[in-house]
Amino acid sequence: MNKNIYIFGAHSRARTLATYLQYLNPDIQIQAYLYNNAENNPETIDGVPVIFLSEMVKLNPEYPVYLGTRGIYHLEITERLQKLGMRNIIPVTPDLDMRLRNQYLRRDFSERGRIFRKLESLSPSVGIYVVKSVFDKPLQAEYQLSEFEKEIQVGAALTEERICKIADNEGEHISDRNRQFCELTALYWIWKHASEEIVGLEHYRRHFLLPKDWVQRMRKEQVDVILPTPLYVAPNVAQNYKERHDVSDWDYMMDYMRRIHPDYYEEAGRFFKMGLYSPCNMFIMKKKVLNALCSWMFPILFICAEHGGAKEDSYQNRYPGFLSERLISLFFEKNKENYKLVYADKNFLP
């Protein structure tokens, strides 16, 4: 791009154009503002001369001329400039103005620590975090992540090895509790640090099966939450947990809920007698919904972990993660009138 340019026009459109061009490319030097009408024009704009275009004016034909005027004048101005030997004439059409304006705003917002979000493109504010750890076994076949998915290393505080650009020990975190909290250390990090409007959590072997236009559908249908298609367990959620894990952890959780969250306790008594819940601690939801979920759930998990302590069996030691699977489902059952929830299937990669 030639750094020396002319701008035809000396009023609002031309000045806006100059701002866009020089902000996006600081090397640009405006040699002159040109005009050919009888309007009162300033002699200079920010130190740049404003020149009446006549046959006596000597312009460099190699310099581009941007037409910063109303489009109805572009043809006449172009013909006049061509007669003066100008070879590179650039009409600022509505499309070019829109491109420059959007580029300007994206950079301006970024430099002010903000995100320039457009209605037609939600994807820049969607982040689905895919959990990985240094102990994961390799997949049998390579899996291509979608444009929305980004890998996050969990338990990063417990190892010097780094396998992802994002690690769960950055900023406020519970990464060092990963042996108990598993993927919840990533959930905690997302809660405290993710800036996207829509966030998600998946596992390197388990991903949601989503249509290509899922973001548009979610926005159009005003969906707040996507959870995995529920799993049926027998004889019910509560008894199934007790048969597979330490009963005392479940009982303590329920007693704590009875004392601290009696409204949830009443709902839990009914819901956990059913056989359906969404497993795997997977979700996609609006960040503001995630904030509400985590603000309620993590204090429960922390107090349960403090009570239950560490367990010798490494699998059973993951009980905070097993409890959270049931708690997430309970939270959205209790708040079914507040959030629009839909389900999606998931895969399992060998």
Image: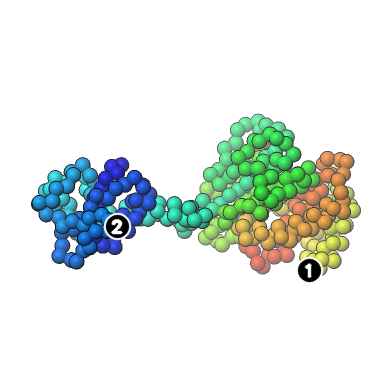
Question: Please, what secondary structure does the residue beneath circle 1 have?
Answer: helix
In percent of width and height, residue 151 lies at: 62, 42
In percent of width and height, residue 295 lies at: 71, 60
The residue carrying pointer 2 sits among few (fewer than 14), some (14 to 19) or many (20 or more) residues within 10 Å by Cα, namely few
In percent of width and height, residue 2 lies at: 28, 42
Q: Which residue type does callout 2 highlight?
A: Asp
Q: Residue furthest left?
A: 55
Which residue corresponds to the image point at 52% horizontal and 60% vertical from the top-left? 220
In percent of width and height, residue 138 lies at: 67, 31
Residue 162 in the figure: left or right of residue 70? right
Q: Residue furthest front?
A: 47
Judging depth in this view, the residue of 98 and 272 nearest the camera is 98
Question: Please, what secondary structure does the residue beneath circle 2 have?
Answer: loop
Name the mark nearer the viewer: 1 or 2.
Answer: 2
Which residue has dot 2 on it? 46
Count the numbered circles shown.
2
Which residue corresponds to the image point at 66% horizontal and 54% vertical from the top-left? 192
**Where is the N terminus found, in terms of image quarters?**
top left
Which residue has dot 1 on it? 263
Among numbered discs 1 and 2, the one appearing first in the sequence: 2
The quadrant holding residue 331 is bottom right
Q: Which mark is residue 50?
A: none
